[in-house]
Image: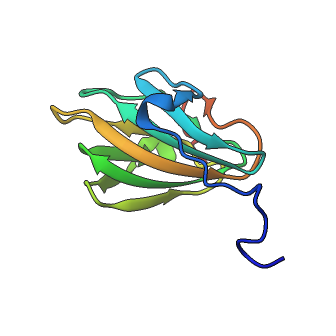
C-alpha cells in the first residue's frame, strides 16, 4: 500500500495535559503519552533534591533525553558508577541495569524517555548487586 492511500490512518496527538499516570518510584512522577506492547513513550518529573529508590526497567531498554534540570544516574557495584546528565543530553539505560535517579539541583528534572521491550516498565529493588 502506498502512503496516503488509507483514509483510516491518522496522526495521533497527546497534549501535555493529556498524559496519564505511569509506573511509580518514590520521588519520580511518570506520565505516559503512548504505550504499546513493545514501547512506552513518556515523561518523568524528578523533584529537586530527590534520590529515587534503586530500580531497573525489567526487560525494557530505556532511551532518554533530559529537557531540563540536572540528573545523576548511579549504578554499578554498590552504586559506585555515576553518569551526569545535563539538559540536551541523550542517554541509554541497558536492559536490567539497576540504578537510581538523583536530582541534587534546586530545579525539577524533566526527562522524556522511550522504553523499548515488553514487561513491567519499572521494577523497584533493594539496590545494585555486589557482583
Of residues 52 and 70, which is closer to you in this image? 70
From what the image shows, is residue 54 above or below residue 91?
above
Write the residue at 43% across / 60% down: 91
Write the residue at 19% across / 33% down: 107
Of residues 109 and 129, which is closer to you in this image? 109
Whether residue 56 sits left or right of residue 3 in the image: it is left
Whether residue 68 sits left or right of residue 29 in the image: it is left
Give how far across and how far down residue 23 sits, in percent: 59, 27
Q: How many marks?
A: 0
Write the residue at 79% across / 64% down: 6
Give how far across and how far down residue 43 sits, in percent: 46, 40
Quarter assignment of residue 104: top left
Give how far across and how far down residue 21 sits, in percent: 55, 24
Give how far across and how far down residue 92 sits, in percent: 50, 59
From what the image shows, is residue 9 above or below residue 109?
below
Of residues 30 and 70, which is closer to you in this image? 30
Write the residue at 65% across / 53% down: 95
Quadrant of the frame with the N terminus: bottom right
Quarter assignment of residue 123: top right
Amino acid at each position: 500500500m502506498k502512503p496516503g492511500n488509507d483514509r483510516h490512518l491518522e496522526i495521533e496527538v497527546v497534549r501535555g495535559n493529556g498524559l496519564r499516570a505511569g509506573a511509580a518510584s518514590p520521588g519520580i512522577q511518570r506520565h505516559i503519552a503512548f504505550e504499546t506492547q513493545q514501547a512506552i513513550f513518556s515523561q518523568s518529573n524528578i523533584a529537586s533534591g530527590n534520590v529515587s529508590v534503586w530500580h531497573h526497567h525489567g526487560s525494557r531498554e530505556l532511551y532518554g533525553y533530559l529537557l531540563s534540570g540536572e540528573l545523576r544516574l548511579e549504578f554499578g557495584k554498590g552504586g559506585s558508577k555515576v553518569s551526569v546528565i545535563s539538559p540536551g543530553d541523550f542517554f541509554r539505560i541497558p536492559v536490567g541495569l539497576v540504578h537510581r535517579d538523583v536530582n541534587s539541583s534546586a530545579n525539577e528534572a524533566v526527562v522524556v524517555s522511550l522504553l523499548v521491550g515488553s514487561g513491567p516498565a519499572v521494577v523497584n529493588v533493594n539496590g545494585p548487586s555486589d557482583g
